[in-house]
Amino acid sequence: MKERRFIFVTGGVVSSLGKGIISASIGKLLQARGYSITIQKFDPYINIDPGTLNPYEHGECYVTRDGMETDLDLGHYERFTGIETTRDNSVTTGRIYHTVIENERRGNYLGKTIQVVPHITDEIKRRILRKEDPREYDFIITEVGGTIGDIESAPFMEAIRQLKWELGKNCVNIHLTYVPYLKAAGELKTKPTQHSVKEMQGMGIQPEILILRTERDLDKAVLEKVASFCNVERDCVVQSQDLPSIYEVPLNMQKQGLDKAILRKLQLPCEGTPDMEEWRKFVEDMNNAKEIVKIAMVGKYDLQDAYKSIRESLIHAGVRNGKRVKIEFVNSEFITKENVAERLSGAKGVVICPGFGQRGIEGKIIAAEYCRLQNMPTFGICLGMQMMVIEFARNVLGYADANSREMDLATPHNVIDIMEEQKSITMMGGTMRLGAYNCQLLPGSRVRSIYGKEQIKERHRHRYEFNNKFLEEYQKRGMICSGRNPESGLVEIVEIPELKWYIGTQFHPEYSSTVLNPHPLFVDFIRAAAL
């Protein structure tokens, strides 16, 4: 196995500084220099995974191909680098403690008293090092969630401190902090950064590279001051100023020599520049696009991060079509038959968003009916697809009481029903239909022409499915099943061929869209919306 190098990315001062974007940007720059990489996220919260978290707590829940519910930063990793992450790329304090306690119950520790040091820290180090992973990596990038000084982060910081001495020249610590601007004083303040670094030094860790998040450009004097006061070389202090798009961050980091600083710290050659031409072209095309395509996202979570992957997939597809996608969130809780036309006015296409629970579903059903009758390009994802199915049953098949068993246990027309294998499940976390499953596409269907192949594999996150008992009625009245799981016969995709673009997917195609390989369904959806 080739020698691996390790990069640790931590954050200080405040949360939400963009450690995930920085980690993904570092991975992209190293890839562009020909290195193989993987990126993993260590989250200090005690949940086993974010699968049971409300999006308002932690944003979108991302799903890997092997069925792990993870932090949304793994979506950034995949979108930027094109790598496929797995359950090994997402670790929480809950998973760490769960493993250690299971080992203790099995007697693996030979009667020892179980302590944070060494047992918890050893388990953290084992997962960071990924010695059981046979794949070849030049770099393993580890992002630690939270903020320096949090009680929850302490075991992770201790593990990193130990690894620095064990790995020596093969690891580098990168710390992302915040430099605020005080309007009243008219000054940028570096003291929070100094205190954050001091906190790390108190834990026995000296950051070797500092990345300073800022809304304003930092002049040479500020950068030199930070370098001097934090014991960091001047060319290892990089600023990350607010940019119009997250996709400009790798180019900004390259311009300031972040990749060179990392390689130098790891005693690796850093001649030449990374090949970022394809990425640069994407950014230029995005910035130069003039024609705007307005897309309405109908959902109940009025939070940008709740539908992060969908938003980014629409941007990728817009660039591929030479368009600038303008996304407008429409809260489904407040959609009525009387105002739906006004709420969706100006939109060239509508995405009916995924989600769980009763709140906001009637608004989604009303939106689906309006879009169907107006022949507006419509893309329903997971619960969004189910709302399209319920609307069709109510207004075309004539089943006024049609619903999902999730919302109405008593409905006789349960066109959406709980999956058979889900009926006996009582535990909530990690028990849905998760990860990538096969889907056979119907010859002659729109989705078959979009994908350009007979069989696909897409990621899922749901408990409820289309009830095949009603399938024949749907197909007779014009809504066809154009994608099915070949093993179970479960309906994966529905579409109405006579409409301009009216497709619903039980799976989540947004998880598979990347900057340089936008998902074909989103690309075709934007193309249709722009016509």
Image (cartoon, rainbow, N blue to C red):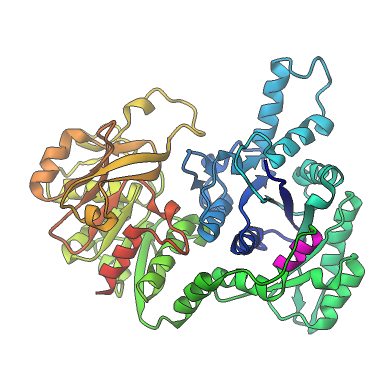
Q: Which residues are magenta?
A: 259-265
Looking at the rendering, which quadrant does residue 118 occupy? top right
Q: Where in the figure is residue 497, as x and y percent of width and height? A: 15, 56
* Vertical arrangement, residue 94 with respect to residue 394, above or below: above
Side of 41 relative to 360 (left or right):
right
Q: Position of residue 30 (x, y in %)?
A: 64, 61
Q: Residue at x 22, y 66 (%)?
A: 376
Q: Please identify the quarter of the rendering in which residue 407 is found.
A: top left
State which quarter of the image contains the C terminus. Answer: bottom left
Q: Is residue 426 left or right of residue 8?
A: left
* Residue 37, horizontal then vertical, whole percent: 62, 52
Decide whether the magenta segment is chiefly helix, strand or loop: helix
Membership of 214 in magenta stretch:
no
User: The N terminus appears in which quarter of the rendering?
Assistant: top right
- Please say whether residue 264 is one of the residues in the magenta stretch: yes
Position of 150 with respect to 451 (left or right) is right
